[in-house]
Image: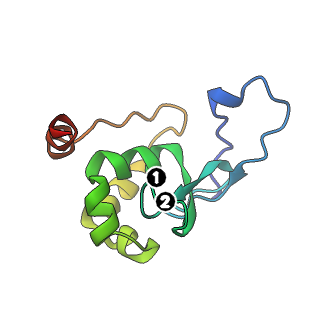
Amino acid sequence: MKQPIVWNPRFENQKYNPHLGCCQICERENIHVEDHHLIPKDKRSEKIKVCQPCADQIHTLFTNVELAQNYNTLEKLKSSPQIQKFVKWLRKQNPEHIKVRESHHVKKWRRRK
């Protein structure tokens, strides 16, 4: 069953949203997706299409260093137990009301900067 189209509020003044597609992490279709670099801050790294909740969750769970070293491919990222648990949860949610909280270990990492 296809998911309903989710309209990102950032684009509500536009008549057409060219960024509707399928998220490569949660595989929900007809939702707003954006390009996401697999290695943060590396503009030459491979890009994947992800929805905002998945992008937020990726940066909530993992530091940029962890992403660059351990999760630098789509397969590695999707095989992470934390991402798998999130995707399972995400597919049950109303797509218009999804909020993601930062993990304690990422909060500590951000404070050290």
Q: Position of residue 62 (x, y in %)?
A: 27, 54
Query: Badge 2: few (under 14), some or many (20 or more) residues near its Cα, within 10 Å?
Result: many
Tell me the kind of residue under disc 1. Answer: Arg
Residue 32: percent from left, percent from top: 64, 45
Pointer 2: what residue? 26
What residue sits 35% from the left and 48% below the top? 59
The reply to whether the C-beta atoms of the residues labelled 1 and 2 are less than 8 Å apart is yes
Whichever of callouts 1 and 2 sits on the residue coming sooner in the sequence is: 2
For the N terminus, the quadrant is bottom right
Residue 69: image location, x then y, percent: 28, 70
Would residue 85 be seen by someone viewing this image from the given angle? no
At a point 78% along the width and 40% down the height, the residue shown is 17
- Under tag 2, what secondary structure? loop
Foreground mark, 1 or 2? 2
Which residue is at 57% across, 56% downward?
Answer: 28
The image shows residue 19, relative to residue 1, as above or below, that is above
Q: Quadrant of the C terminus?
A: top left
Q: Amino acid at mark 2?
A: Cys
Whether residue 75 appears in this view of the structure is yes
Residue placed under numbered mark 1 in the picture? 91
In the image, is residue 19 above or below residue 6?
below
Q: Secondary structure at mark 1?
A: loop
